[in-house]
Amino acid sequence: MSTAKNGDTVTIDYTVSRSDGQEVGNTNESGPQDITLGTGEIFPAVEQALAGMEIGDRQTVSIDSDKAFGPRREEMVIDIPRENLPPEPAPQPGMALQAQQQDGSPLTLYVVEVGEQTVKADGNHPLAGEDLTFGVTLRDIKQAA
């Protein structure tokens, strides 16, 4: 039986959980995902686990927050005056806003609180500061040419 190696495109199913056990992602609805090993499409620790696996193998991979989405940075939580936002749609907690950083690069902010005069938005990735656990099952291997 063949094993996955760098350059191969593998088909995987996965679940992602936070350290408290809450599942925060999976392939249940989207279906299995294709990943080309060695191209950085997924966290390096998951790629390393997939390399050497055979079809049907399952592994659990733990990733510390600093190697996942990084630490949570409080300076990324900002108050935005409501007059700086379009009137519609009305801001709601959980809503994503697109902003531009000082260097011109895009930034997604998530509304965490809506006040009378300001909206508190968080520029951290929703999983920043979280240790993650991936449960990965290898479904198929397409060998690199």
Image (cartoon, helix red, strand yellow):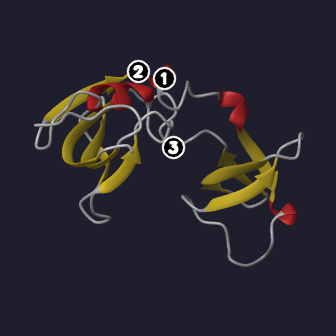
Q: In screen coordinates, is 53 left or right of 127? A: left
Label 3: few (<14), some (14–19) or many (≥20) C-alpha neighbours in 10 Å: few
Type of residue at label 3?
Pro
Which quarter of the figure is the N terminus placed in?
Answer: top left
Q: Earlier in the sequence, mark 2 or mark 3?
A: 2
Q: Earlier in the sequence, mark 1 or mark 3?
A: 1
Give residue 75's quadrant in the image.
Answer: top right
Which residue is found at the position 61% from the left and 52% from the top? 110
- Give the numbered dot on residue 64: 2
- Count of all numbered marks drawn on residues in the image: 3
- Give the numbered dot on residue 37: none
**On the image, numbered disc 3 is attached to which residue?**
126
Which tag is nearer the camera, tag 2 or tag 3? 2
Which tag is nearer the camera, tag 1 or tag 3? 1
**On the image, numbered disc 1 is attached to which residue?**
67
Which residue is found at the position 51% from the left and 20% from the top? 66
Give residue 114's quadrant in the image.
Answer: bottom right
Question: Helix or strand or loop: what does disc 3 sit on?
Answer: loop
Q: In screen coordinates, is 128 left or right of 1? A: right
